[in-house]
Amino acid sequence: MPVELRRVCVVGAGAIGSLLAAHLSRVCEAWVLTRRPQQAEQLNADGLRVSGKHEFVGRVHATADASELPDFHLGIIAVKANDLEHVGQRLAGLAPQATMMTIQNGLGAEAVIARHGDWPLISSVTFMSGTRRSDVHVEYELDTATWLGPWASTRTDQAVVDAVAALINASGLNAEAMTDLVPAQWSKLIFNSAINSVSALTELPHVARYVDEEEASSLGHVVRALVEEGKAVAAAAGIELYEDPWDMNVLAVKRGETSHSDYAHLPSMLEDVLAHRPTEVAFIAGALHREADRLGVPVPVTAAAHRLIKGKEASWRTGVRT
Amino acid sequence: MANGGPDMKVCIVGCGAVGSLFAAHLAQVDDVEVWAYDVVAPHVEAINRDGLKLTGEANITGRVRATTDAAELPACEFGIVATKSMYTRAAIEASAHAFADGAVASVQNGVGNEEVIAEHVERVIRGTTFPAGHVVEPGVVHMDTRGDTSIGPFEPKPAPMDAVTRLAEAITAGGMNTRALPDARGAQWTKLIFNAATNPLGALTRLTHGRLCELPETRRLITQLVDEGKAVAAALGITLDSDPDELVDHAAKVAYEHRASMLQDVLAERATEVDALNGGIVRFGEEQGVPTPMNQAIAALIKGLERSWQQPR
C-alpha cells in the first residue's frame, strides 16, 4: 500500500523548521505550528521566503494554536531539544494516524515525544544549515543531507521512512533513508559534543583552529579529546559509528573555508550562548556524559565541558554581562 | 649614607596596579629611591607630575621617578618586575642594564617569569604577592586588598640571601609585609595552583568566584585542576604553604563577588596570563612526567577564547 504523505506539519519555524516547511510546501500541503501567533499570521500573509542555495517563496499554512491543525500524515518536530516536552504536550491527542519525525541535536528527543502519543517515530539527524533572517525568511546555507531511520522502540515501518526521505528529496532538500540510524546519530552526537561544546566555551565559530594540533595549547587537542571520549562511550555501548567524528570535523572546516573564504559557521550552541538562551548541552555533551557514567567509561573532558557550559548558563541568571 | 644620598635604588619594572602598590609603598621609606619603568605614557607623566597616589586599603602618595624609556634608568640595587607575565621578556630585555650589579625579583602571576628574567640578569629573586589593586586613572591606583609577599632566591641563578632579606625589610618598612624565605617555591605554587584552578573557570563561565564555588559542577572542576597542580608540585619536591583547595573555599567566603583577573581580561578582550598559569603547570608537568590533561584542555579553551576576538563579527 502506498504511504500517504499528503499533509505535513512542521513544528517550530526556526532555521531547520523553516527550511523544511518552505521546501515541502512545493510538494505537499505544508502546515507550520509556531509558538508565537504573530509569526503564524505573517507566514499566512507573506509565505516563507528561502534565499541562499535556493530562491523561492513557499506557501505554507501556519497557526500557533495546535487545535486548529487538520489531521496530518507526517509531523516533523523541529524545535530546540529543550522545548520538546512542551511540544509533546501540545501535540498529545492530535493526528493519531501520523508518523512523527524528530530532528534535534543529540540524544533523547524521540523518547520525550513518545511519552505524549503512540505515533510511530522516525529518528533523523541533519547536516543542512541555515540562518533565520526574519520570521518569514530563512537563508539556506549548507545543502548537506538529512539522514532518517526508524526509531526502534516504535517499530516504525521502513516503507514510511523511505517515503519520507523521497518526499524530502522531491522538495529539493537532500535526505537519505537508513534502516538503522543509531550509527549516524552517534557520529553526529560525538561531532556535536566536541564542536558545540568548544564553540560555546570559546565563542569561536567552527574554523580551522578546531583541527589545529600544532602546539600543546592548540584547540584541536580539546576537540580530539572530546571525540576520543565520545568514541570510547560508543564502543562501550556496542555502537559502530557511521563516520569518524574527527573526519567530520576536518571535512566541515575544509568545506567552510574553501567554498566561502569568509564563511565561519556558528554552531547552534554558540548562537544560543550569544543570545543568552539555555543551550542543548543536556542532550549533547550532557547525554554523552550520562551514557559514559552508565557504562563506566571515564570522560573527564566531556564532563568538564558539560559542567562549564552549565556554569556559563548560570552566569546569565546572575547578571554578569559582557 | 653620609652624604645624604639614597641607600637603595629600586626600579619597579611594569608599574601597573601591582607595580604601583610596591612603588608607592617603597617610596615611603627614607633612603630608598624608587624608579618606575612603564610603557603607559599618561601614567608615567602623572606620576612624575603629581606623585603616585594610592587609595582604598592604602592612602599614601609616593615620590617616584617614572619613565617610558628604559635607557634613562640608573644602576639599581633591586628590580621588581610586576608586568603581566606575557610582557616579562620585553620588559626585562629593555631594562636589564640597570641591574648589572643588582638583583631582580618577580612578583608576577604564574610560573616561568623568573626563568625569563634569569636569561638577562645574574641575580634573581622568586616572588609571590597577594595584594591587589586597579588603576583608577593615570597616577592613581586603588588598593583592593592587602596581603603578604614572599620572596626567596631563584635557585638556578640565586640572589644572595642577605640581598633577599634586605629587599624584604625595605618593602615591609614601606608598609607591605614581605617574608624573606630560603625556598619561596611553596608560596608561589600555592598561589599558582589556586589561580590556575579558579581564574580560567571564571573566564570561561563568566561566574564570580563565589558562584563558581557554589555550583557543584564548577566546584568539582576546581578540585580536579587543583589535584593536577598538587601532583606536579609534589613531583618537583615543593611543599605547599597551604592547601589550595581550602584557599578556594576561604576565598568563596571573603571574595564572593570577586571577578577573577582573567575574567576581567576576557570581558575587556585583553590577552590573559593562561600561559603562565595552566600553561606553566602543563610545562612543569611534562618535565616531571606528570599528566595534566585538565589543565591542558582548559588552557587550550582559553587560547581559543582569545582567538575568538580576532574573528570578524
Image (spheres, coloured by chain):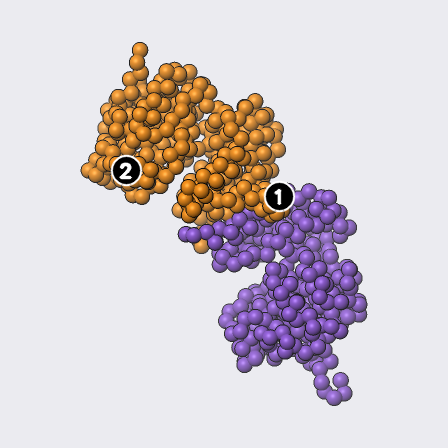
Chain colours: A orange, B purple
Residue that label 1 marks:
B294
Q: Residue furthest left?
A: A45
Relative height, residue A298 to residue B54 (above, below): above
For the C terminus of chain A, the quadrant is: bottom left
Percent position of residue B165, x then y: 76, 69
Residue A74, relative to residue B214: is it above or below?
Answer: above
Query: Is label 2 on the same chain as label 1?
Result: no
Q: Is residue B194 visible?
A: no
What amino acid is labelled 1 in the image? Met
Image quarter of residue A49? top left
Task: Report the amino acid beneath label 2.
Answer: Glu
Cα distance between the residues tagged 2 and 1: 47 Å
On the image, the x and y values in percent for residue A261 come to 43, 46
Residue depicted at 28% across the width and 38% down the height: A55
Chain ID for label 2?
A
Question: Image height check: is B159 above or below A182?
Answer: below
Q: Residue at x 48, y 51 (%)?
A: B308
* Residue A210 pos. (x, y %): 52, 43
Relative placement, left or right, of A15 versus A220 is: left
Q: Residues within 10 Å of mark 1 (few under 14, many from 20)?
A: many
Please report contact status of discs 2 and 1: CB closer than 8 Å, yes or no: no
The extreme top residue here reads A1
The N terminus of chain A is located in which quarter?
Answer: top left
Q: Position of residue A37 (x, y in %)?
A: 25, 38
- Observer-nearest of B189 and A257: A257
| A176 to the left or right of A183 | left
What residue did someone put label 2 on? A55
Q: Residue furthest front?
A: A258
Q: Secondary structure at mark 1?
A: helix
What residue is rendered at 45% in x and 43% in y? A257
As drawn, B277 above or below A119: below
